[in-house]
């Protein structure tokens, strides 16, 4: 098949030195071009446009579209900002702050320039002055004062200095540097705006922008707040289905609350009788039948101090002295005294002996130093004989022998001795009650009986 060379098409001259050959049944006659095709003010019309997915270069001229091999999508160069189709979302905004807003600045809306269709922007400071909802995103290019520029709302910003961070850092809007980032989440009343994540930490780094605004309870759709005042709380309104601010309740409503009755609009609480047990007390120690609750909230065993200040010692077991006229210290009836202190003591002694000629004898001693005092003792024998004598001491009290009675030699024949004695000691010492046989000899035993009582108190 042969072709006839043409000089005109639809009345238009075709310039050139060679012939125009149309092949392939009417296709566009330009395959394997070695130069750009410039259609001037005319466009292309067709079923699709196929981009070269393995380009040898990336155009940088504004308005050019090419394939982004890294992101597997087409990219458009926009005023120095490259946007990836279906991956990046931008705002076009205007800077009227008086200074250049650098690339990578967190910005907020600062009004509009209505006739131009532009939102005015300014660096955002997350100190709570403006609500988080004013945040628009991050500038993807430096925007001169008075110029328009692109603000990234969602997507990646490349060739941005992220060398002060590490890969994976979460970036928040800074509450101290307007337009800056911080890796520490701010706290109220500062704004909490998560802005981006660091993809690549480097001088020519990459961040992924995705502003996430902090929640503000004042603007929550499930909450209605009207003229809030200090101390109010949120309560649920079943009718409206909303949480609303109300005054905090002063007290419980009146009525029987089980073990507690509330009255006076919650101001008076009355605990019912017999409902508070030991387990409800916060006392220390162990409650038992032998302890009581002290004023300092402690369970304690009662001591033997009576309201008049006496301390009482009760002898816990019988004690014998056998075949010995030397005074022996009673193991129970003794107490500590302070040098120079003045004391009053009383002893009620239950005693007996098994020898009529070796009468029971007693004495009072101090373990150190000496003592001064004067008192008396009174003894009753089984024969009705009463012994009444005075006690006096300078360094120590003399030994005394209350009469056991005539022809009574039986340890079960109990007798009674009462001693009253005030004194003072010269040293920190122990006051000792002592007893023995009046004379040594085989088969002679003197006994001080369990239950004998010593009472004492300091009187100065």
Image (tube, rainbow, N blue to C red):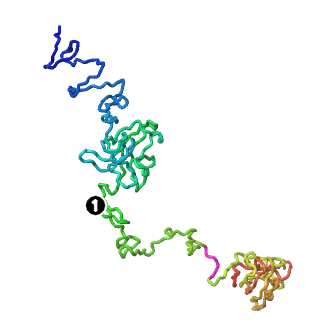
In the rendered view, tell whether residue 325 sits above or below residue 218: below
Q: In this view, does 112 lie to the left or right of 410?
A: left
| Rendered-image quadrant of the C terminus | bottom right
Picture coordinates of residue 206 (x, y %)?
41, 37
In the rendered view, tell whether residue 402 sits above or below residue 288: below
Crowding at dot 1, Cα within 10 Å, few <14 / some 14-19 / many 20+, comes out as: few
In the rendered view, tell whether residue 309 sits above or below residue 44: below
Which is more toward the observer, 325 or 270? 270
In the rendered view, tell whether residue 325 sits above or below residue 249: below
Q: Is residue 324 left or right of residue 82?
A: right
Which is more toward the observer, 324 or 12? 12
Q: Give the extent of the magenta segment.
A: 301-306
Picture coordinates of residue 237 (x, y %)?
29, 61
Q: Name the residue under label 1.
A: 238
Is 250 inside the magenta-drawn segment?
A: no
- Which residue appears farthest toward the top when viewing the image? 1
Q: Could you tell me if residue 212 is visible in this image?
A: no
| Rendered-image quadrant of the N terminus | top left
């Amino acid at each position: 098949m042969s072709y006839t060379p043409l000089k005109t098409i639809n009345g238009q001259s075709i310039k050139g030195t060679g012939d125009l050959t149309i092949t392939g049944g009417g296709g566009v006659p330009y395959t394997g071009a070695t130069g750009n095709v410039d259609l001037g003010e005319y466009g292309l019309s067709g079923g699709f446009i196929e981009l070269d997915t393995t380009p040898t270069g990336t155009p940088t001229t504004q308005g050019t579209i090419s394939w982004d091999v890294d992101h597997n999508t087409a990219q458009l160069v926009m005023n120095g900002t490259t946007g990836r189709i279906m991956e990046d979302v931008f705002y076009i905004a205007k800077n009227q702050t008086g200074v250049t807003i650098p690339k990578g600045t967190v910005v907020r809306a600062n009004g509009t320039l209505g006739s131009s269709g532009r939102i005015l922007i300014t660096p955002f400071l997350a100190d709570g002055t403006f609500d988080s909802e004013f945040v628009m995103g991050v500038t993807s290019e430096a925007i001169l004062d008075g110029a328009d520029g692109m603000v990234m709302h969602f997507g990646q910003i490349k060739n941005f200095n992220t060398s002060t961070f590490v890969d994976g850092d979460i970036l928040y809007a800074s509450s101290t540097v307007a337009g800056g980032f911080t890796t520490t989440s701010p706290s109220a009343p500062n704004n909490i705006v998560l802005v981006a994540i660091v993809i690549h930490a480097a001088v020519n780094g990459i961040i992924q922008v995705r502003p996430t605004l902090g929640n503000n309870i004042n603007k929550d759709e499930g909450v209605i707040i009207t003229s809030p005042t200090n101390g109010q709380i949120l309560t649920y309104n079943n009718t409206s289905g909303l949480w609303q601010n109300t005054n905090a309740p002063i007290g419980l409503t009146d009525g029987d609350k089980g073990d507690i009755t509330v009255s006076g609009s919650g101001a008076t609480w009355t605990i019912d009788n017999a409902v508070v047990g030991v387990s409800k007390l916060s006392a220390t120690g162990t409650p038992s039948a032998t302890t009581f609750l002290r004023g300092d909230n402690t369970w304690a065993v009662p001591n033997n101090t009576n309201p008049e200040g006496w301390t009482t010692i009760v002898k816990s077991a019988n004690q014998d002295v056998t075949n010995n006229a030397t005074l022996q210290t009673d193991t129970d009836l003794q107490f500590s005294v302070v040098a120079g202190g003045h004391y009053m003591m009383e002893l009620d002694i239950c005693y007996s002996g098994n020898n009529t000629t070796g009468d029971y004898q007693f004495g009072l001693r101090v373990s150190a130093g000496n003592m001064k005092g004067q008192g008396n003792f009174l003894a009753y024998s089984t024969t009705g004989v009463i012994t009444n004598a005075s006690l006096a001491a300078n360094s120590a009290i003399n030994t005394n022998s209350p009469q056991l009675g005539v022809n009574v030699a039986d340890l079960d024949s109990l007798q009674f001795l009462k001693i009253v004695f005030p004194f003072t000691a010269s040293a920190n010492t122990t006051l000792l009650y002592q007893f023995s046989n009046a004379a040594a000899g085989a088969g002679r035993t003197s006994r001080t009986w369990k239950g004998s009582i010593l009472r004492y108190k300091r009187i100065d």
